Amino acid sequence: MASKNLLLLAGDGIGPEAMAEVKKLIVAMNDKLGSGFITDEGLVGGCAYDAHGAAISDADMAKAMAADAVLFGAVGGPKWDAVPYEVRPEAGLLRLRKDMELFANLRPAICYPALAASSSLKQDVVEGLDILIVRELTGGVYFGEPKQIIDLGNGQKRGIDTQVYDTFEIERISGVAFELARTRRNHVTSMEKRNVMKTGVLWNEVVTQTHKARYADVKLDHMLADAGGMQLVRWPKQFDVIVTDNLFGDMLSDIAAMLTGSIGMLPSASLGAPDARTKKRKALFEPVHGSAPDIAGKGIANPIAMIASFAMCMRYSFGMVAEADRLESAIAAVLDQGLRTRDILSDGMTEVGTTEMGDAIIAKF
Amino acid sequence: MASKNLLLLAGDGIGPEAMAEVKKLIVAMNDKLGSGFITDEGLVGGCAYDAHGAAISDADMAKAMAADAVLFGAVGGPKWDAVPYEVRPEAGLLRLRKDMELFANLRPAICYPALAASSSLKQDVVEGLDILIVRELTGGVYFGEPKQIIDLGNGQKRGIDTQVYDTFEIERISGVAFELARTRRNHVTSMEKRNVMKTGVLWNEVVTQTHKARYADVKLDHMLADAGGMQLVRWPKQFDVIVTDNLFGDMLSDIAAMLTGSIGMLPSASLGAPDARTKKRKALFEPVHGSAPDIAGKGIANPIAMIASFAMCMRYSFGMVAEADRLESAIAAVLDQGLRTRDILSDGMTEVGTTEMGDAIIAKF
Ligand SMILES: CC(C)[C@H](C(=O)O)[C@@H](O)C(=O)O
Ligand SMILES: CC(C)[C@H](C(=O)O)[C@@H](O)C(=O)O
């Protein structure tokens, strides 16, 4: 049997609380189903900075490189607002993405039927929504050089960031988007700002070529990223798979997540290229929500996004499709039952804490 | 009396139809009120390319530099999708912004009461919404160098865009935001990605310093741009003035516009610095909507955003506050009366075309 080595990086804020529920689930699966997960743990973010002076230590980075999959909680909080840029909590996450070459970030925006009413959008606009944002994750303005602040003298400074994309980077991320579209509604919308950015011109060109050469059976549309943001708000159901760059993907996937009214519920997967020999992809799974320092340690955080991230992990890293389906159904069933953490509470529902929510899902699994 | 020289650049698509309604209004104001507007016209966008091979000719650019204000329609359309990047329709607008040094783009997102129900957001989320996005317009990734596509050989190309901000650029745009906040609800939210971008770090630092030195009476919040996008969708009424860079401003202002359900209704103003001698600011006024080539020439375009842009022009360029107020009230009155162009049509309302809508507003003015 293939190995199932998981590295758990719970991070800061509500990360550890949410991760605790996944740990319970893993123990239960190992005990009852003999699933054979082997877990190890490490530090990332502010807690890693406190312990080692870096947002992730080289030792933990090595563990991440060796693991079959990484489960990531969340990083950051006001405690670390003033630490130097190079060791800020986010630097740990960015190093994981870069060193593991996790170029493909998959962010499903799904509207759970039980939560359709809690969106700020009209119910008919979001009910049944199921879109997938495929975000390029190792390029663009996040990593391009030069990236610096220069002192110009005279009280003036100059900040510089550089957005860079090469053909092969656009090719491989659009390949992922087209492949996934084939398993869904066969429709990809590519978003960039080709009317202003040269990287947008190249993005548009390469996506078009990749489509023509290898995926002509998939419907492809192009949209300017600003218009795309508007269309997401106007009528999100027009989309199936959206493929876009690192920075636009950051903005657009957060907006898509918020549409569903379920930001505390949404998972994400970050995948690398298949290894030439083993065919395995490096992978990291992470909830879309952040560290929520204001509610950390109170036992009220919603663990669903973290648990759903573990479902994605089973699906994409271990081919455990049946188990992933069952876990997702368990989440939906618990919601149908009326259980809610505070962030998604509405009239007539039963408020539960983090551990009760985790227990309820495990019980239904 | 100060001069009132207006340059009208109607542009492409529905631009000319919408501008025609403003022209009627100007004629009426000159005739009945002796307003003394003097208008000239020029070409911008695809029509300028067709006529001169450039997205704006040097002659028209000179007229824009000399005018007291420019009214701009919209540019672009499929006809020019394949023209070279340097002369694409948008290049005309970008040259106007750059050469006139229109660094401050003001985009009000207002929800007209008569249209609150037509938003894709729940009525209570958007009803009464009145926020102002102050977008930096002459810097950032739109204009930074290098901006190019390099051929790397081997079928590989590299696209590069550069985001650059200097202290003085951030200082002057945040000054505009703080000044405007004082005339409103006294609250500014600054948005950037300081956790990923060095320009974000500098942006945050300079806004904070400007606030401390000159505007400590205004409430200032900082938000990451991705979180800001989410909060706009979740509960937009938490904002008063949002100040942000060129690219984030492009995305966020379009999203804010779409929230209101009134994208065909929203104007914008782009302002330069006050002239040292005359104190006058160069200015361009433009609807937020684009050229909408699919409905161009059919007489069904909504002229309200263009007319509301002229109201902003009277307010900001000519100090005609009473007239601007009256024009905005006339728009609201016509909407209350039930008149609607097709883009905002709903049950029980009366559909009218572009010219009827213009006539109705002029009649109420
Ligand atoms: C934490 C931050 C660096 C990160 C990003 O900007 O990519 C986050 O917003 C995300 O979307 O995963
Ligand atoms: C037309 C285009 C160049 C422009 C921009 O990106 O600034 C438009 O989207 C806008 O927001 O005014």
Image (cartoon, coloured by chain):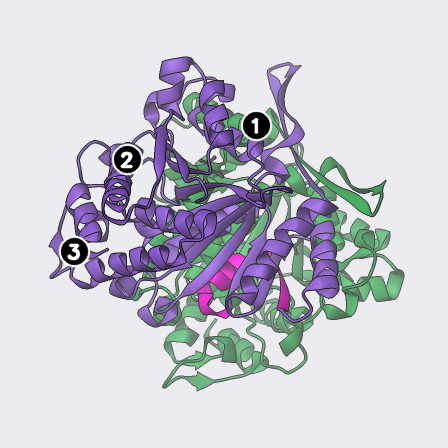
Chain colours: A purple, B green
* Gap between marks 2 and 3 measured at Cα: 19 Å
- Numbered disc in front, either 1 or 3: 3
The residue segment tinted magenta is: A219-238
Query: Percent position (x, y) of residue A41?
Result: 35, 28
* Gap between marks 1 and 3 measured at Cα: 43 Å
Q: Which quadrant of the view contains residue B116?
A: bottom left
Q: Residue at x 17, y 47 (%)?
A: A359
Query: Percent position (x, y) of residue A244?
Result: 59, 52
Dot 2 surroundings within 10 Å: few (below 14), some, or many (20 or more)? many
Q: Residue at x 25, y 58 (%)?
A: A330
Q: Is residue A194 above or below residue A280?
A: below
Q: The numbered mark 2 sits on a residue in which chain?
A: A
Dot 3 surroundings within 10 Å: few (below 14), some, or many (20 or more)? many
Question: Residue A84 versus residue A41: which sits nearer the camera?
Answer: A41
With A58 as the anchor, is A121 left or right in this view?
left
Q: The numbered mark 3 sits on a residue in which chain?
A: A
Q: Amino acid at mark 3?
A: Leu
Question: What number is the disc on residue A14?
Answer: 2
Q: Amino acid at mark 2?
A: Ile
Question: Residue A216 versus residue B283: which sits nearer the camera?
Answer: A216
> Regarding mark 2 in the picture, which secondary structure is present there?
loop
Question: What number is the disc on residue B198?
Answer: 1
Instruction: List the residue tagged with mark 3.
Output: A339
Q: Is residue B42 visible?
A: no
Q: Is residue B338 above or below residue A78?
A: below
Query: Percent position (x, y) of residue A114?
Result: 25, 64
> Regarding mark 3 in the picture, which secondary structure is present there?
strand
